[in-house]
């Protein structure tokens, strides 16, 4: 049985993110993940 996954990726402007470098959530092989605010929502 095959299933299909519908994906949608939104491109956002970096300047629209409010990132505090002190809000690091984690790090790994793909880089560092920070807590940020975008469009009045908390994102990572």
Image: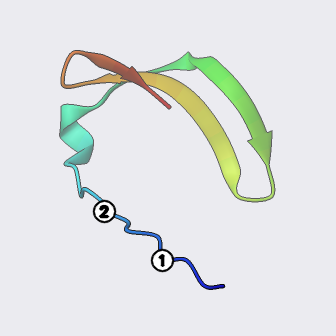
The picture places residue 36, in percent across and down from the top left corner, at 42, 23
Query: Which residue is rendered at x = 65% and y = 23% of the image?
Result: 24
Observer-nearest of 16 and 9: 9
Q: At 26% from the left edge and 45% from the top edge, which residue is drawn? A: 14
Residue at point 38% right, 66% down?
A: 7
Q: Is residue 9 left or right of residue 32?
A: left
Q: Nearer the viewer, mark 1 or mark 2?
A: 1
Decide: few, some or many residues near mark 2? Use Cα within 10 Å; few <14, some 14-19, many ≥20. few
Farthest front residue in view: 1
Which secondary structure, mark 2?
loop
Callout 1–callout 2 Cβ contact below 8 Å: no
The dot on residue 8 is 2
Other residues around mark 1 within 10 Å, as few (<14) / some (14–19) / many (≥20): few
Q: Which residue is mark 1?
A: 4
- Is 5 drawn above or below residue 14 in the view shown? below
Residue 23 rendering spot, x and y as whole percentages: 58, 16
- Among the 4 quarters of the image, the one containing residue 1: bottom right
Q: Position of residue 39 (x, y in %)?
A: 18, 25
Closer to the camera in the image, 32 or 5:
5
Instruction: Please name the residue shown 24% across and 58% down the image.
Output: 11
Seen as rendered, the residue at the extreme bottom is 1
In the rendered image, the vertical position of residue 6 relative to residue 40, given as above or below: below
Is 1 placed above or below 23 here?
A: below
The CA distance from mark 1 to mark 2 is 13 Å
Quick check: 21 left or right of 25? left
Describe residue 2's horizontal placement relative to residue 39 as left or right: right
């Amino acid at each position: 049985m095959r299933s299909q996954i519908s994906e949608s990726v939104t491109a956002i402007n970096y300047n629209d993110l409010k990132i505090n470098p002190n809000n690091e959530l984690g790090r790994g092989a793909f880089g560092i993940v920070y807590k940020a605010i975008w469009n009045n929502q908390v994102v990572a």
